[in-house]
Amino acid sequence: MSEIEFRGVGKTYPGGTTAVSDLDLRIESGSFTVFVGPSGCGKTTSMRMINRMIVPTTGTITVAGQDISTVDPVRLRLGIGYVIQQAGLLPHRTVLDNVATVPVLRGQSRRAARRDALAVLDRVGLDHALAERYPAQLSGGQQQRVGVARALAADPPILLMDEPFSAVDPVVREELQAEMQRLQADLHKTIVFVTHDIDEAIKLGDRIAVFGRGGVLQQYDSPQRVLAEPATDFVADFAGRDRGYRGLSFRAADDVALHEIRSVTAAQVPELRLEAGEWVLVVDDSRRPIGWVDVTGVERVRAGHALAESMSAGGSLFSPGADLRQALDAAISSPSGIGVAVDDSGAVTGGLLATEVLDRLAAQRSDEDAARNRHFFEQEQTR
């Protein structure tokens, strides 16, 4: 067990600045908890108190039921993985030796630690060819993967991550977020992740702790409830005016109807005869979408490889198992007004309409209202 609990925890610095105020919070073992909020709200301070890099002024923090103030800080940190912005790798050590650092400090032989480090590189999706390179020879995304690998090398039950993906470009950030989701599904660590990005928090977290100015915890809840039922005006403002749209990501799109789309190959485009307002989807020989053309014969969507890459981000394609947000985005981001659905191979399976996505949302809400009403009347009858 690796449950973390804050009881009345506060941090006030000399001069009177309060970073964290009377924090009560219980983080369940094996959960992915995200601390989110604007700069200076105490989220990083709160996380760094877990491994005693910052000592609280008041209150108690326990890990697996033990007061961490009674544990030697070095021993405590050796049992907690820690990932920071821009990886924080040792520049004079190779990738392999960076990953092996904590196991060696814990007494494992260097040879055994380096051998095990290779297995950890596999786990985070890094090629063994990078093992003997130095941090300066890696891309930003590769450095962050090495940082995650180093934190996982000693198999700690707790992983602390301080805005680890904020310094990489959006495409790499998306890849790293997906990698963290995959790793957590496999490893079930107790993860505390700090970010100022509400979208990142919603995507990654089982639970979200929203911090406000003065280090006051505003809400600690599931991503769905933070979006649908913000506890304070601050949370509502921080989640954004489009929080209802974000909330669609928690709704299944399995029952949205798919319609046949007229499609042609690129070689057939010059022969097309289209009416004004008519669109045709251009596909390759494997029926993967390349783009849309209209009466002008001009492609209105990105080239094929870029369109395919957008599948992981929602983009203009709707892929298997995607949610209502991705379905609606596929429809409204398409120049034709028709979202393109694809199978696992990327081949077109049909088209979807924004109006029908909204109809599906209305049906789901109607079902939820009916279920709530049934539950209410059942409770009334038992009184």
Image (cartoon, grey):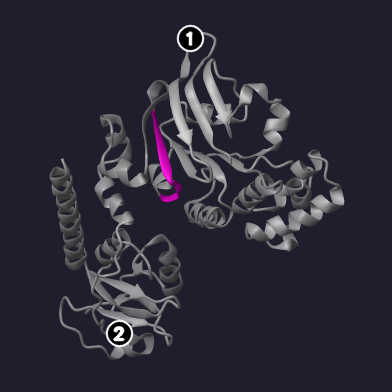
**Residue 95: percent from left, percent from top:** 74, 51
Q: Is residue 291 left or right of residue 147?
A: left
In the rendered view, tell whether residue 341 sits above or below residue 208: below
- Residue drawn 37% across and 82% down? 283
Q: Is residue 132 visible?
A: no
**Residue 207: percent from left, percent from top:** 42, 42
Tell me, yes or no, whether the two marked residues, 1 and 2, touch with CB atoms within 8 Å: no
Q: Is residue 151 left or right of residue 336?
A: right
- Residue drawn 58% across and 41% down? 1
**Residue 158: percent from left, percent from top:** 60, 41
Q: Amino acid at mark 1?
A: Gly
Q: Is residue 207 left or right of residue 50?
A: left
**Residue 127: percent from left, percent from top:** 69, 63
Q: Earlier in the sequence, mark 1 or mark 2?
A: 1
Q: Is residue 373 visible?
A: yes
**Foreground tag (1 vs 2):** 1
Helix, strand or loop at label 1? It is loop
Considering every residue shown, the one lying at the far top of the view is 15
- Residue drawn 26% across and 40% down? 229
Magenta-highlighted residues: 203-211
Q: Quick one: quadrant of the C terminus?
A: top left
Helix, strand or loop at label 2? It is strand
Residue 207 is inside the magenta segment:
yes
* Disc number placed over residue 301 in the picture, else none: none
Q: Amino acid at mark 2?
A: Ser
User: Residue under circle 2?
Assistant: 263
The Cα–Cα distance between marks 1 and 2, rounded to whole angstroms, is 67 Å
* Disc number placed over residue 16 in the picture, else none: 1
In the rendered view, tell whether residue 80 sits above or below residue 338: above
